[in-house]
Amino acid sequence: MKENINMNNYENLKNSHPCFAGHKANKGRIHLPVSPGCNIQCKFCDRKINDYEQRPGVTSVVIKPDEALEVVRKSLELCPEITVVGIAGPGDTLATDYALNTFRLIKEAFPDIIKCMSTNGLLLEERAEEIIEVGIDSLTVTVNAVDPAILTRLNSAIIYHGKHYEGEEAAAILIRNQLAGIQKVSEAGITIKVNTVLVPGINDLHIEEIARTVSEAGASIYNLIPLIPQHELSECEAPNCMQIETARGKAAKYIDVFRHCQRCRADAIGIPGEKDFGDQIYLNRIAHKDTFSHG
């Protein structure tokens, strides 16, 4: 395992990364939508290309790694408060090579900017060395359950090494790879944030176990994302404020809990909760295309 010599550890990121510092830091981020494909099917996930929905998995355009450098340059001119370049979709960052190739370019062109990425974790363990090599400072892994019986109610299938898996077999593979990957990457000095989509009646009573397990694996901070009822879970109810706070309280027994998530788009640019500069950067937005092939 290579040593990560980047000094952006968890304590330092609390002052410079909006997903760690919250609103107090007044720091901005760029999400580069370079990852089109995904290798798992979450029952609540509905990835789209449009310019009006404000949620994860949505972007106005998918760009190439070499185009991403110009996006970063223009974004820093418009919003000097930006401290972070992240890649969070619209697909999974490790399902294709586009995200890692983009970070290689960014590492050379913008060596001082914080680099973060999000993943479902299916390929995290086997691609850990690449993540370290491109200089990732913080990594977000979405872990919605650590019990295969529960995860099957949230994930329909995975594609792993070219093979289609379903049911508890798929869930067990995903959970094992997530936890092994978190441990491997955190041991290299990269800060790990875990996201969990909170789904009442499915994993709301499981949050404490998730938080304890990912903390033991090496995660530093935990973020609960309220379900947006859609796709196969369109009939489920979103959690109310009391359910969210109860779940956060259970998680906080084991790990720091982030409470300011804006559920950003995959092409978000600017300070979370304030003006988004995406319209000025992505001039050729696709306004009403509802579907998108993830290849």
Image (tube, rainbow, N blue to C red):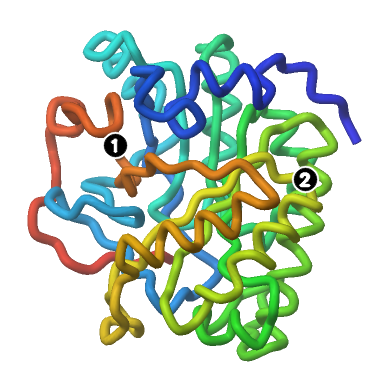
Residue designated by label 2? 218
User: In the rendered view, does 258 fall on the left or right side of 182?
Assistant: left
Q: Which residue is mark 1?
A: 268
- Measured along the vertical axis of the image, is residue 2 above or below residue 290? above
Q: List x then y, in percent, for residue 202.
A: 49, 82
Residue under the point 46% across and 23% down = 84
Given contact means CB atoms under 8 Å apart, are the residues at marks 2 and 1 in contact? no
Q: Residue at x 72, y 55 (%)?
A: 214
| Number of residue marks | 2
Picture coordinates of residue 119, whole percent (x, y) = 57, 52
Residue 98 seen anywhere in this rendered image of the structure: no
Residue 8, by quadrant, is top right
* Amino acid of disc 2: Gly
Q: Amino acid at mark 1?
A: Ala
Q: Position of residue 152 (x, y in %)?
A: 58, 85
* Residue 9, position as x, y percentages in the image: 69, 22
Which residue occupies 61% across, 41% down?
256
Query: In the rendered image, which quarter contains the N terminus?
Result: top right
Residue at the extreme left of the image, as rendered: 288
